[in-house]
Image (cartoon, rainbow, N blue to C red):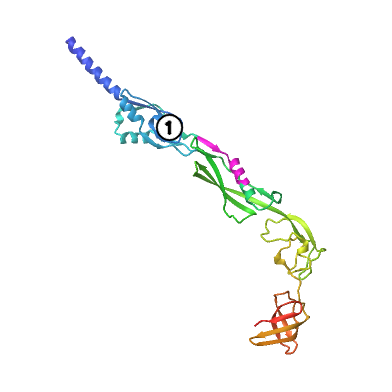
Amino acid sequence: MNLTYVIRLSAIIFLFVHTAVAEEIRIDLKEKVTLPEKQIVLNDIASLSCNNPFLLERVGNIQLGNTPWPGNVRKIERDSLAVRLVDEGIDMSEVAYSDVAFSLVSVESTTVTGDEILRVAREYLMSSLSRPEDEMIIESDRSIPDKLLPANEGDIHLEVAQVETNKDRGNIQLIVRILINNSLYLKVPVYFHVRVYETVVASRKKIDRNDTLTSDNLTISRMETTKLFKTTFVKMEDLIGKRASRSILPNTPITPEIVDNSPAIKKGDLVKVFVHSGNLHVVTKGVAKEDGCVGKIIRVKNLDSHKELYGRVEDSTAVKIVF
């Protein structure tokens, strides 16, 4: 064989092999990668090699989607990677992989602890409740998990709001809003149970219906009033002389619903009965058929006609008939 021919053939083979090798793209996937929040490109998750620098740059910048949410992991497998390579016009026969079959991508993050969220929510609640701190116990039986946020994204700020703004006891729900650079990133519900203790006027012993309230059957006591969504009395003198509108058990906080003013007129009292109808004005005598406070409608018997009528108690001596 002609020596010159052999040399030329060897050169052609070398150039062919060199060209083929030069265009081969080798992809060595990294098993685990932690990135800042960004659009992932192939260079982020793999070591690439190729003798064609322009092809190497092109392949390295192929976009693979966004990084996952903080605390999550995104799995990028060879199959999904191959789809993106084909989409970019890469000949898969020129691609070689290492033994690693996929890459796990997580994002750089910073942590807002559950304890911090709970502390901020509690401080807000204590400042918003219109009662002294020693009158309430704020409890929470639900732990708050730590929240992961994107790292180095800017200023992190917590804002708190109450769901039912007029509620000051019992089960109360707050919403903690986590903002990054004044933009809402996450909402976290927080639950508290507020127990209220107040010094109130309560019954010292059992008080029967229509009994008059006195210093003997009342007492000043500090007790839990969490379930009592009503106005209570804090001064005993505001109740002395009133009467119980129903039976009151011992150690019961006194509220306006269970007391009434002592009757201005009692059953059997003689009263003046005023009748006004148009130009007719009559004053006669009657007898009260039931007790009545000022302003209350009671039955009275007209002593002249012996008829029973309904009238409004004007004072301790007079009833005005209503039609």
Task: Count numbered badges in the picture.
Answer: 1
Q: Indicate the amino acid at tag 1.
A: Ser
Magenta stretch, overall SS: helix
- Residue 141, position as x, y percentages in the image: 63, 47
Q: Secondary structure at mark 1?
A: strand
Q: Is residue 138 above or below residue 12?
A: below
Instruction: Report the magenta residues as a range.
Output: 109-123
Quadrant (top left/top right/bottom left/bottom right) for the N terminus: top left
Q: Is residue 212 above or below residue 8?
A: below
Q: In the shown orientation, is residue 233 left or right of residue 323?
A: right
Depth check, front residue: 318 or 270? 318
Q: Check residue 115 for magenta coloring.
A: yes
Depth check, front residue: 7 or 280? 280
State the residue lying farthest toward the front: 279
Q: What residue does disc 1 label? A: 103
Which residue is drawn at the image coordinates 45% and 38% (left, top)?
A: 68
Q: In the shown orientation, is residue 61 left or right of residue 174?
A: left
State the residue lying farthest toward the top: 3
- Residue 26, position as x, y percentages in the image: 35, 26
Which residue is drawn at the image coordinates 33% and 33% (left, top)?
A: 85
- Residue 70, position as x, y percentages in the image: 49, 38
- Residue 261, position as x, y percentages in the image: 74, 70
